[in-house]
Structures are given as structure tokens and as C-alpha cells.
Amino acid sequence: MTQAVIEQEWKPKASLLLITIAVMLATFVEVLNTSIANVALKYIAGSYSISNDESLWIVTIFLIACSILLPATDWCCSVFGRKRFFLFCVALFGGSAALCGLAPNFEIMLFGRILQGLGGGCLLPLSQAILLESYPKNEQPKAMAIFSTGITIAPIIGPIIGGWLTTNLSWNYVFFISIPFCIAAFIMISLFIEDPPYLKVNKRPKFDHLGMFLLIMWIASFQVMVDNGQKNGWFDSEYIRNLGIVSVISFILLIWRELKARQPLLDLKIFKNWNFTVGTMMLTVLFGVAYGTIAILPQFLQNMLGYDSYLSGLAAGPMGFGTITGVILTAIASNKKVDLRLQALFGLIIFSIGCFMFSNLNMNIALANVIIPNIVLGIGMTSVIIPGTTLLFCNVGKQEMTNASSIQNLIKNVGCAIGTSSVGFLVSSYSQIYQGYMVDKMTTLYTPFAERVSMMTAQFISLGHDVATAGMMAQIMMYKQLVQQSVLCSYINAYKIYGIAILSIIPFTYILKKFVFVETKNK
């Protein structure tokens, strides 16, 4: 019996519902941990008597570790078996979460986050591959709808849950909350997940040690560069330049090695698949922009409007409602067998509209000005991710699924890192540019400025200040307003750039190959 026939005939013994719950528990808790600890960093820094900059390593080291073992997922599955490796990752993730919550010092905390990242990084590709293999092809859009819901809602509610736990209990519970999820996932995976026959091959492929070394060098240098670029002035800093050089060289050598190796760590031949290549590019840009929009709103609310960390996280909550709405709309469209490319096109347009709606920010915005655009972003995001992911994997063989999912998630992680770091870069750069534009108007030769200063000076004099002091206070007040307006304009421009970036990938929907819905016959 040929491999293709085995793939087509195999069906899991457990029900799809139980399989879905099992893998989604693991997926949800992993993605949740990419954002849940962010709001607790200053409290953790206080507990360990470290600086806020040092506390950022709790996030950075986790993201690096998540990406390191991810490309080796396929190799680990072929050696240990996918189910065993899945269980190991869940156990490692849960155990290291407990270690982080109980860490007596910062060094143990970082060690725990490394272990947590190593265990968590492989959970997404494993879950995605299992869902795509278990569901019939005609129901793969449904599988990706469930998967996409988990990976989009988790980072949104992460800051909300983290803020509540930190405020009402302690920061330790930000890590402890993962433990019950991991226990439940471990039990359900043990009971309901099985390895398909085409993966039950007792082989010991040679491990690509050089490829792994180059991958670690690339991921580590790249992640540290994007996380620390803004505060170090990007490439004006020798430290950032050196990281950039190491990142580029190691990336080029990694590609060369994987193309030449007989048994590569990453099988790059998957990029011969047109839908996989184009879909990966499209979703990488989408996730980069999505993570940028998730990161920028709390910064605006905290820095400009004075929200605390919990309220700013709560303000992003309506995006979760939009996500669920997007899932419902996508399900309706898929049931009617609407072309998945049209669904993705619709999602991109809606997402870009949400970005441009946020470009109307001001210092007197009402709550509706935050809620409505967030809902629109949520609808657009899931309306792209679900059909886009289905199109991306529709022509990938089941035996290639784990490798393809690992590569796609690795590239997606890179896009998310760029998107998150873009917030600081765009806000800082544009605020300086706008300050340069506005400062030219801060002269008594400019009539509106002179009149404004004169009016404010009179107000301060009426409060009992002398003329010289009142004039100085008026000019200081005007400068503060200038800085505030320049920063506000930088947030507005950032959202406009995100909207344009989304519009730029619309052509990708036209060059993807069509997903063919299989007609099912009622017996």
C-alpha cells in the first residue's frame, strides 16, 4: 500500500472533539504565556531588586527559547514518536512554569523561562499538524478556525489575566495558572492522541548539529537585536550593529547548510509548494502587524491617557469579541463554500479599515473610539488567518505536515518579533520628526504661538506669579504640549503604516491556488 493511500485511509480512533480539546489546551496555554507576563515585569523586577531593563529578559529569553527547538520538531517526532514528544513538551512546559513561579532568584527565573520556551515552542506546530491530519480535507477550514481562535484570543486576554492576577494575588500566579492547563492537556493527549501509521517509523536520522548551531546563533542575535534596538538607538549602537551582522551571517549560512545537508534540520524543499510559500509570506506580515497593533494600544493608553496596566490590557478585550465574530462569519462563508481567497481578501480589507480607524486617535477620545476599531481588527484578523492557514497547508502532504508547520511557525515568530519591536521604532522616530516640524513654529515671530504664550502668561500672572516667571511657565507649558502632540501624531502614523502594510499584501490573495471543497454525499 502506497504512502498516499495510507495517508488518505487513516483516521484517528478518538472523536474529533476530544482531539481538538486536547491539542487546543496545549496551544492556548503556550500562546497565553507570550503576553501574560508582560504586565507583571515591574513587580518581578521589584521582587528580585533588578532594573526594568533586566526584567525584559524574562520575555526575551522565553521568545528565543520558543524558536530554538521549534525547527527540530520533525526530527524529535521521528526519533521519539510524536505523541511521546508532545507529552514531554507539555510536561516540560508545566514543570518549568512551576519553577518560574517558585524561583528564589532572577537566575533561576531565567533558567525556568528557557525550559518553558523549549517546551512551549514545539506545541504550536504539533497541535496544528495533528488538527490538519485528523480532520478530513473538507473540514480543515473548521480545524483552522478553532486553531486560529486560540492563537489570536490568547495573546489578547493574556495582559488582562496577568494584570488581574498580579493586582489581586501576586505575580507568581502569572506562571502558576499554566499548571492546571498542562495537567489537563497531558491527560487528554495520553488518552486521545495517537501516532498515524505513516509516522510510526523506527528510524534514527542523523541530527544536523551545525544547522542547529547556526539556527541558535541567528534566532538569539536577531531576537536580542529587535528587543534592545530601540533603547540603544538601533544601528547607531555598535552593540546592535554587531548583533545585526551576526544575525545576517548566521542566517545566510543556515540557509546554505540546510540546502546542502543530506538530512537537514529544516527541509526547505517545502518552499517549492506555491501556496505554502505565498501563504507563509502573507501570514507573516499579518501576524507582524497584528502583534504591533496589540502592543501599541496599551502603550498609547498608558503613556498618553494615564491608564494603568490592567485597564490598558482590558481595553484590548473587545478584539476578542471581534475574533469570535470573525470565526462565525468565516464558518458561514465556508459552509456556503465561498472561495477561501475571497474570504482572506475580505479579512485584509476589514483589518486595514480597523488600522485606519485607529489613525483618528486624539487626547479626548471616548471609549467607543477604542472598542469599535478593536472589534473591527479582531474580525479582520481571524477572517484572514483561518482561510489563509487552510490555503497555506492545503497541498502539503500529511507526512510533511510537522516539518511545514514548524517552518511556518518559525517564520511567523520572526514576523511577530519585528512587529512588536516596530512599535517603539515608529513612535520614537515619528515623534522626533514631528517635534522638528513643530518647533519651527515656536517663535514669537509666529503670530498664533505669540498669542497663545501671551494668553497663558496672563493666566499665570492672575494666579500671583511675576511677569518673568509667568512667561517662563507659559513657554514650558507650550513645549510640553508640543511633545505631547508630536507623540500623538507618531501613534497615528504608526497605525497608518500598519494599515498600508496590510493593503500591500492583498495581491497575495490573487496568486494563491484555489482550495477545492470536496463534495460529501449523504449515505
Image: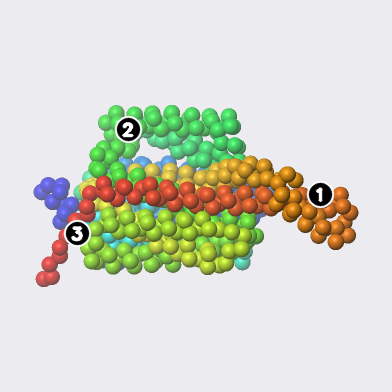
Which residue is identified by label 2?
Answer: 258
Which badge, 2 or 1, comes first in the chain's sequence?
2
Pick whichever, 270 or 173, lies toward us. 270
Disc 2 to disc 1, C-alpha distance: 64 Å
Q: Which of labels 1 and 3 is toward the front? A: 1
Instruction: First in sequence, mark 1 or 3: give its number.
Output: 1
Q: Earlier in the sequence, mark 2 or mark 3?
A: 2
Q: Quick one: SS at disc 1?
A: helix
- Nearer the observer: mark 2 or 3; the answer is 3
In this view of the protein, can residue 276 be seen by the observer?
Answer: yes
Residue tagged 3: 517
Circle 3: element type: loop
Q: Position of residue 496 (x, y in %)?
A: 48, 51
The type of residue carrying mark 1 is Met
Question: Contact (CB < 8 A) between labels 2 and 3?
Answer: no
Q: Is residue 373 above or below residue 61?
A: below
Q: Amino acid at mark 2?
A: Glu
Q: Which residue is mark 1?
A: 472
Residue at the spot 43% in from the left edge and 58% down from the top edge = 353
Give the color scheme: rainbow, by chain, secondary structure or one colour.
rainbow
Q: Are marks 1 and 3 in contact (CB under 8 Å)?
A: no
Residue drawn at point x = 41 percent, y = 32 percent = 251
Compared across the picture, whether 519 is left or right of 429 comes to left
How packed is label 1: few (under 14 Cα within 10 Å), some, or many (20 or more)?
A: some
Tell which of 441 and 175 is nearer to you. Answer: 441
User: Residue 27 sits in which quadrant?
Assistant: bottom left
Which structural element holds mark 2? helix
> Residue 265 location, x and y as percent?
33, 37
Foreground mark, 2 or 1, reads 1
Q: Residues within 10 Å of mark 3 (few under 14, many from 20)?
A: some
Q: Position of residue 377 (x, y in %)?
A: 44, 60
